[in-house]
């Protein structure tokens, strides 16, 4: 029904005529077309008719009290419902433009609907709106809206154009102001001589700023003679002053200027003594015979209390390790590193080369192995360690890695100590590996060990004990296990037993190495595989292997 | 990353430049007194030697330290077309122990200089900093109180702006347009490219000084 009526109407009559819009603005033609008012009007009318018919029928039924034909009436209702739905659909498309069509009126929006539906603004907003439009349109209120719009647009354009021209004028004015201030004369030229001078100065300045040319001072002038400015005074300790010059050979002096002498045994022993003095503190916490954990450091100094040490300075720092293992060792390691470097410089060239080789291996292990071997030698030979310097070298290698892993090392070492005795068999295998580490340096160490005084050895040996930081590093390199095995065992046995025998002036590095070896024990059972793998890199160690093996039995006490 | 240009100006025109900059930037000028220590690493510290600069700002009541690493500049045809130098730069505030740290790491002092001047930090399309300073060298190590200018008659003008790899073209453009404002007094160019002084500098300075004297901000 609605469809046929719609079709009839679709003849395309004119939209609602403007007379209706006398008071109201006519709808936008597009909206009108979309809205298709005719169609909707027709539908609305048909819907009205249908509802009227139904009402009449119901009225008639009520009067006659007849039984209604429910099915028929329900059918009518459904028809009405459908028509209503169609009308709403039609309107919906365009109603968004100017009506709010709530789909569902329920408790929630029932109260707010009136406000939302109202097109009248709140009073304040309305006043605001009025004021602004007044201001804007004060001359144009009487004109029709399109005209007003046009006028506003033209106003905006005018302002935009004014801005652009203003910017342009300013730019031109600036250029001309600066450029032609001189007046009639053209651009002034700089005479050539002056230009050349300026060019020269400019090059000086630019190179100074960008590359530092002309600012570098020769080495001899790089001494801090005058007092440091405030901001550097507390940053640079006076001792550090000589550390930092690229010209210099990189010698690091740490309170031991007298040690910078030519390399010879005497100097080394002096050096060792002095550095030993500093490093002895680390020695204090030497582990006792292998069963005590490394944290238990009180016992160790006592063992050596009566041993003839190189100086009275051994007991200066009784147990720094005890106090703060982890913090101190890194610091000490750094200090030791500095001192070790000094010693490095003093070593004979071949030893230095060896050290370089060792360094290239990228691990503390080779050095450690050698140190251990040399320690082993010491213990066995009761010789004085000239290899202290070598240890120093190794120490240089270690200290950096060691600092990172000291805690780990310590933990491991204590375990190692407990397991030390069980590992001897394994150690034997690894011992051969250790021999591979021996090298010219080791031989030299061995030889050197002959010459240093016993007391120094003792001191150093004891000093060697506590350093546990090597352990983790060794583990990491795999080879460590191998290194630690036998030598550690021997060393620990012998060192602790010997006591005064050979400690002498061994460097703290030895100390560390010792610990490393001890720690190895702990690692061995778990790290047996590591050891095996570690052995492989050990293959490229130097050749004095047979020497050591032969020497070691000879040197057994 | 940063965009940077440098230029030189004769010391006699610095005041005029300051007036011009004050007008252009509209911010307060910051005095500058920076002790710059350039540290180089020793060869066995790495594959190539690296350089790090420690800047100590002496202007503050409490000296503040900054560490700066200047990396390589952008290269290529695109870089040549840009009129500013774009280079990697990493900077951070550090404590005063930074110097000791670097020494301990193995860095050695290569050279040091003292910059005395002023700077303006403002936003002109991109946040940038203009620094006008006299570069001084110290005859004795660390003797900042006895520093003498490397070139007494010429000061260095540097304009830097932080940039990232996404926006460096915009930053470069903003910097370029700002530099045009300074054209009457000095030319700015990439570090390493020398510019000479501008012929109009004297005239521009004179005009700035004459007017600037009358209208104090």
Image (cartoon, helix red, strand yellow):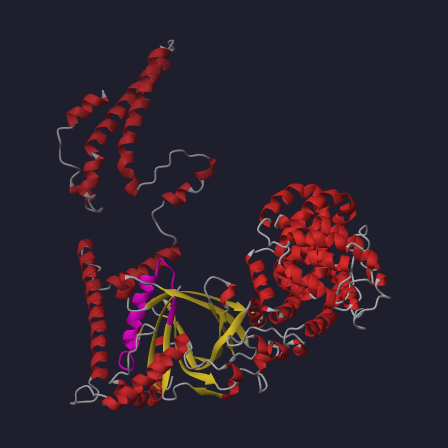
Closest to the observer: A252 or A171? A252
Residue A253 % position (x, y)? 63, 75
The answer to which image quadrant residue B158 occupies is bottom left
Closer-to-camera residue (A438/A368): A438
Q: Is residue A141 above or below residue A218?
A: above
Q: Quadrant of residue A385?
A: bottom right
Q: Is residue A152 left or right of residue B146?
A: left
What residue appears at the point 29 percent right and 34 percent down from the top-left corner?
Answer: A92
Coordinates of residue A132 in the picture (x, y in percent): 31, 61
Q: Is residue A177 above or below residue A76?
A: below
Span of residues in magenta? B160-188
**Residue at 40% of width from left, 45% of height from top?**
A115
Residue B169 in the magenta stretch? The answer is: yes
Give me the residue at 17% from left, 56% from top. A147
Q: Does any portion of residue B60 appear in the rendered image?
A: yes
State the residue in front, B53 or A548: A548
Quadrant containing the N terminus of chain B in the rendered view: bottom left
Quick check: is A254 in the magenta stretch?
no
- Residue A128 position in % (x across, y down): 35, 60
Q: How many marks?
A: 0
**Picture quadrant of residue B16:** bottom left
Q: Is residue A60 at least partly visible in the picture?
A: no
Foreground residue, B154 or A552?
Answer: A552
Q: Residue at x 27, y 25 (%)?
A: A47
* Residue A140 position in % (x across, y down): 20, 61
Compared with A537, A48 (above or below) is above
- Quarter of the image that includes the C terminus of chain B: bottom left
């Amino acid at each position: 029904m609605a469809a046929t009526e719609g079709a009839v109407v679709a003849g395309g009559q004119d939209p609602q005529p403007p007379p209706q819009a006398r008071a109201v603005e006519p709808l936008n033609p597009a909206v009108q077309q979309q809205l298709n008012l005719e169609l909707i009007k027709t539908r609305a009318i048909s819907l009205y008719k249908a509802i009227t018919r139904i009402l009449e029928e119901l009225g008639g039924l009520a009067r006659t009290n007849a039984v209604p034909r429910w099915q028929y009436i329900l059918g009518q209702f459904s028809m009405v419902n459908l028509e209503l739905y169609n009308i709403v659909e039609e309107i919906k498309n365009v109603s968004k433009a100017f009506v709010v069509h709530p789909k569902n009126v329920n408790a929630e929006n029932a109260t707010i609907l009136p406000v939302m539906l109202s097109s009248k603004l709140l009073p304040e907003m309305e006043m605001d709106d009025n004021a602004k439009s007044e201001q804007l349109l004060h001359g144009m209120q009487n004109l029709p809206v399109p005209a007003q719009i046009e006028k506003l647009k033209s106003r905006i354009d005018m302002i935009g154009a004014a801005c652009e021209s203003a910017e342009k004028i300013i730019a031109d004015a600036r250029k001309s102001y600066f450029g032609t201030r001189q007046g009639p004369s053209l651009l002034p030229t700089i005479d050539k001589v002056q230009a050349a001078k300026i060019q020269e100065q400019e090059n000086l300045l630019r190179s100074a700023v960008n590359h530092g040319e002309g600012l570098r001072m020769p080495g001899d002038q790089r001494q801090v003679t005058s007092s440091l400015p405030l901001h550097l005074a507390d940053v640079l300790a006076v001792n550090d002053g000589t550390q930092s010059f690229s010209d210099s050979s990189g010698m690091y002096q740490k309170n031991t200027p007298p040690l910078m002498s030519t390399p010879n045994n005497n100097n080394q022993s002096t050096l060792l003594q002095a550095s030993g003095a500093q490093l002895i503190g680390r020695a204090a916490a030497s582990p006792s015979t292998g069963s005590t954990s490394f944290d238990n450091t009180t016992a160790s100094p006592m063992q050596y209390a009566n041993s003839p040490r190189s100086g009275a300075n051994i007991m200066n720092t009784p147990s720094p390790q005890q106090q703060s293992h982890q913090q101190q060792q890194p610091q000490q390691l750094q200090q030791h590193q500095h001192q070790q470097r000094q010693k490095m410089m003093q070593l004979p060239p071949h030893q230095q080369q060896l050290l370089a080789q060792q360094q290239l291996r990228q691990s503390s292990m080779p050095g450690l192995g050698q140190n251990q071997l040399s320690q082993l030698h010491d213990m066995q030979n009761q010789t004085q360690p000239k290899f202290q310097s070598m240890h120093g070298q190794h120490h240089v290698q270690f200290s950096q890695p060691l600092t990172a892993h000291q805690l780990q090392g310590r933990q491991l070492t204590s375990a190692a100590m407990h397991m030390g005795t069980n590992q001897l068999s394994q150690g034997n295998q690894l011992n051969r590996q250790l021999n591979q580490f021996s090298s010219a340096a080791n031989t030299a160490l061995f030889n050197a060990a002959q010459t240093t005084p016993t007391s120094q050895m003792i001191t150093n040996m004891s000093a060697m004990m506590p350093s546990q930081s090597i352990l983790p590093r060794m583990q990491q390199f795999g080879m460590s296990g191998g290194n630690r095995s036998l030598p550690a065992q021997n060393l620990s046995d012998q060192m602790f037993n010997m006591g005064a025998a050979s400690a002498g002036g061994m460097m703290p590095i030895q100390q560390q190495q010792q610990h490393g070896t001890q720690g190895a024990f702990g690692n061995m059972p778990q790290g047996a595989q590591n050891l095996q793998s570690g052995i492989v890199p050990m293959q490229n160690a130097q050749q004095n292997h047979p020497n050591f093996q032969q020497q070691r039995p000879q040197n057994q006490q | 990353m940063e965009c940077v240009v440098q230029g030189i100006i004769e010391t006699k025109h610095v005041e005029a430049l300051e007036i011009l900059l004050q007008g252009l930037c509209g911010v307060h000028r910051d005095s500058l007194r920076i002790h710059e220590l350039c540290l180089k690493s020793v060869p066995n510290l790495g594959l190539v030697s690296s350089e790090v600069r420690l800047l100590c700002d002496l202007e503050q009541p409490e000296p503040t330290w900054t560490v700066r690493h200047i990396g390589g500049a952008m290269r290529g045809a695109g870089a040549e077309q840009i009129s500013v130098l774009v280079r990697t730069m990493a900077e951070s505030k550090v404590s005063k122990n930074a110097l000791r740290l670097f020494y301990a790491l193995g860095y050695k002092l290569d050279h040091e200089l003292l910059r005395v001047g002023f700077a303006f930090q403002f936003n002109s399309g991109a946040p940038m900093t203009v620094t006008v300073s006299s570069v001084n060298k110290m005859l004795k190590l660390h003797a900042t109180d006895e520093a003498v200018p490397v070139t007494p008659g010429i000061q260095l003008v540097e304009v830097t702006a932080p940039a990232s790899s996404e926006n460096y073209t915009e930053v470069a453009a903003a910097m370029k347009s700002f530099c045009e404002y300074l054209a009457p007094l000095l030319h700015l160019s990439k570090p390493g490219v020398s510019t000479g002084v501008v012929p109009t500098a004297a005239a521009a300075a004179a005009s700035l000084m004459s007017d600037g004297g009358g209208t104090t901000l």
